Image (cartoon, grey):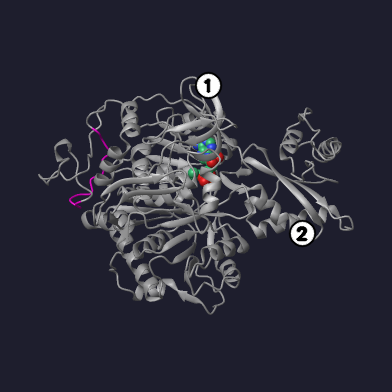
Amino acid sequence: MAYHLAARFCKNTVSCKFAKAINFSCLRCNVSTVVSSSFEFPNFKTHNELHEFSINKTDEFWASLAHSRLKWLKSFHTTQQCNMDEGKFAWFFGGQLNIADNCVDRHALVKPDKVALIWEKDEPGNQQLVTYRELQEMTCRIANVLKAHGVQKGDRVAIYMPNSPIAVASMLACVRIGAMHTVVFAGFSTEALAARIQDASCTAVITSDQALRGGKIIELKRTVDAAVAKCPSVKHVFVSQRTGADLPNMPLDLPLDKLMAQACQHSAIEIMESEDPSFMLYTSGSTGKPKGIQHSTAGYLLYASVTHQSVFNVGPDDVYACVADIGWITGHSYVVYGPLANGATTVLFESVPTYPDPGRYWEMVERLQINQFYTAPTAIRLLLKAGDAWPQKYNLSSLKVLGCVGEPLNHEAWHWYNELIGQSKCDLVDTWWQTETGGICITPRPSEAGAEIIAGMPMRPFFGIEPAILDSSQKLLEGNDVIGSLCIKKPWPGIARTIYGDHERYLDTYFRPFPGYYFSGDGAHRHSNGYYQVTGRTDDVINVSGHRLGTAEVEDAINEHAAVAESAVIGIPHPIKGEGIYAFLVLKDDVVLDQVCIVSEVNSLVSTAIAKFAVPDHILIVPALPKTRSGKIMRRILRKLVAGETEFGDVSTLADPSIVQVIARLHLDSNRNLM
Ligand code: WT7
C-alpha cells in the first residue's frame, strides 16, 4: 500500500503543486467533499516508514497535511515555532482560518444534503438526521443570537447541555464567532459548574430546560440557575427546550429556540489566527482545582481531523459513531470536530448503554448501519457482564473498526469486544490520549492493511508522536522492555497551549517534571516488541469509568463536612468502573453524630460538590491517617492495605507506624466483600 502525498488537494487545479499525486478532490478549494478513506503519501510503502518520516521531517509532514486537509483563509508562513521548556507552541503561524468554516460551511457548499449528524435520542429507536446544510443554518442562527447579545471574539461561553444537535451547533457557533466555549458535562453539580464558569469568567451560558438520560429527567436549567446565582460574570442564559418543561423564568433567561427562529440563517465567519484559542475544557488534576485546558485553532483541528481519518479509516459513505458525551474531550475531538472536519456522518448518542436494555448499542448499530464504533472500556465491561445474548440478537456485520478510550482495556473485555461485537473481522483500536493531547497519540494503525493488532495495549505511536519512557531520576530509558513515566519528546499540533489563566501550573504539571519532555502523568511499559502498554496514572488522579478525578478534589469536598477533621482518598480496582473510590475519614474529637449518618452526608456532599460519579464506593472512619513526620499522607500505604498486602515497606518514616495495623484491622472488619 502506498501513501500518496497530500491526497486531497485539488485535482482540477493544474497549478496545484501536489495535484499530480492525486486522485481525490480538494477540501481547500471546496471543489468537492469527496472524503478519502485515508490520506496518502506517495513515497512510503508502510506505516513505519511514514512514521519515521513524520518524526524526521516533522514540519514537512504536518505542513503538507495542513495544506491538504484544512481550508485556509490565509496560508501560514511558518509550520511550527515551539519551545517545550517554556510551554510555548505555535503551529501554522501566520495562517488564518475558521473552525466552523472547516467543519460545516465547506461541506454545506458542495454536499448540502449529506447527513452530518445522526442524533440517537434517549428515547430508543428515535434517531433524527441533520444535514450539513441544516447544521450550517442552526450554527449561523445561534451565532447571530450570541452576537446580538454582545458575545464577541475572545469571550467565554459555558455550554451545559445533553448530546444534541443544538449543543453541537452551539459549540460551532462559538468557534464561528471566535468565542471560546467551555462545555461542562451535564452530570456535574451546581458547585462544579459554578467553579468552571467563575474560573473562565464566562459571560454567557447555553443550556436546556432538562436532559433525558436513560429515561430519567435531569434538571439542567435548575442547576444552571443555582450556579449562575454565584457567577456575576454571566450576563445571559440561553435556554433551549429539550423536554418543554414548565420552569420558572429567571431574569437572565433568553429563549434560544425562539431567538434562533427570528435570527438570520446566514452569518459571517470570524477570521481566526492559527494560534487563537478555540475552546477550553476543564479536567481534574492532582490538586483540588480543575484545570481549564486550552486548545488552539489550526493545530487542534488538524490533529483531530488527521487522527480521526487515519485511526478510524472512515469512508465517504460510512456511518461513524463515537458514543462519548460532548462534555469530555472525546466528544469534542471524535464526535464533533474530527468527523465534521472530515465531512463525515457522525452519530450523536444521547442515552446510556443499558437503556432500555443492554442491547441498546447493538440495536443501534444494526438500525443505523454503523461502520465504526468508539466507546469506553467501562461500557464494554458492563455489557460483557450483561451476557452474550444481547449482541447476538442483532446483525453487527456493518462494523469495520471498533475503538475504545479512557483506561486500559483488559484482556477479557478486549476479546469479548473483538469476538462478540467485531465477530473477529474488525480492527480493534485501543487508543491512548488525554484532554491535553487534543487527539489520539498511541494506537494500532488500522488504516494499514494487515497490520498486527495485539490485545490489551494501544501499541504504536501515531504519526508525529515520539513517546519516551523515563525513570524517577529523569533518566531516559532506551531500548525495549522498560517501564517508567510516559512522556512525549516532540511537540505535535494538537497539544494544549496552556491552562487557562495559569501558565505556571501548565509548566509545573507537564513540562517541569521531565525537562525537555511533555509528561502525561501516566506510566507505560515498552514491551520487547517495541509496543506500548499504558499502565495507569502515576499521580494522585483516579480514573473512574474513564473520568478523571483528583484525590484532592474529592478530599476537599469531604472535608467540608463539619464532623470531618481530615480525609484521604485512593483509587481501588473496580470490576466495571476500572477504578472506584475509597475514602478514609478522621473525625473531629467532639463528634457525637452516628457514623452511618456521617457517611451518607459525606456522600451527598461529594455529589453536590462534584458529581454523582465522584461519590466514594467505600468510606472507612479511622482514628488517624498514615502520615510522614512532615505531615504528608502516605496514600501508597493505604493502597497496599486495601489490596490485601501485609508488607508495607519502610514505615519508619511515619509519625505513628502503629496506625497502619489499626487501619488494616478496621478495613478487614468493615468490608470483607469489598474486593
Ligand atoms: C487519561 C486521560 C482521552 C479521552 C478520554 C479520557 C487514561 C486514556 C487510555 C488507554 C490506558 C488510558 C490515561 C490518561 N487513558 N486512554 N487507551 N489506555 N489509559 O481523557 O479525562 O483526559 O484522561 O485517561 O490515564 O492519562 P482524560
Residue farthest to the left, as pictured: 14
| Left or right of 347, for residue 292 | right
Query: What percent of the width, then of the height, locates residue 550?
Result: 63, 48
40 in magenta: yes
Residue 650 lies, with reference to residue 267, above or below; the image says above
Region in magenta: 29-41
| Left or right of 36, for residue 362 | right
C-alpha gap between disc 2 and disc 1: 47 Å
The residue type indicated by label 2 comes to: His
Query: What percent of the width, then of the height, locates residue 592?
Result: 89, 58
Does the residue at mark 2 contact the one at mark 1 (Cβ under 8 Å)? no
Q: Assign a secondary structure to mark 2.
A: loop
Magenta stretch secondary structure, dominant: loop
Count of numbered marks: 2
251 in magenta: no
| Left or right of 51, for residue 403 | right
Residue at x 90%, y 58% (from the top left corner): 590
Q: Assign a secondary structure to mark 1.
A: loop
Identify the mark nearer the N-term, 2 or 1: 1
Q: Closer to us: mark 2 or mark 1?
A: 1
For residue 561, which numbered disc appears in the image? 2
Image quadrant assignment for residue 537? top right
At label 1, counting other C-alpha atoms closer than 10 Å, the crowd grade (few under 14, some 14-19, many 20 or more) is some
The residue type indicated by label 1 comes to: Asp
In this rendered view, identify the residue nearer to me: 404 or 320. Answer: 404
Image quadrant assignment for residue 220? bottom right
Q: Which residue is mark 1?
A: 481
Residue 48 lies, with reference to residue 441, above or below; the image says above
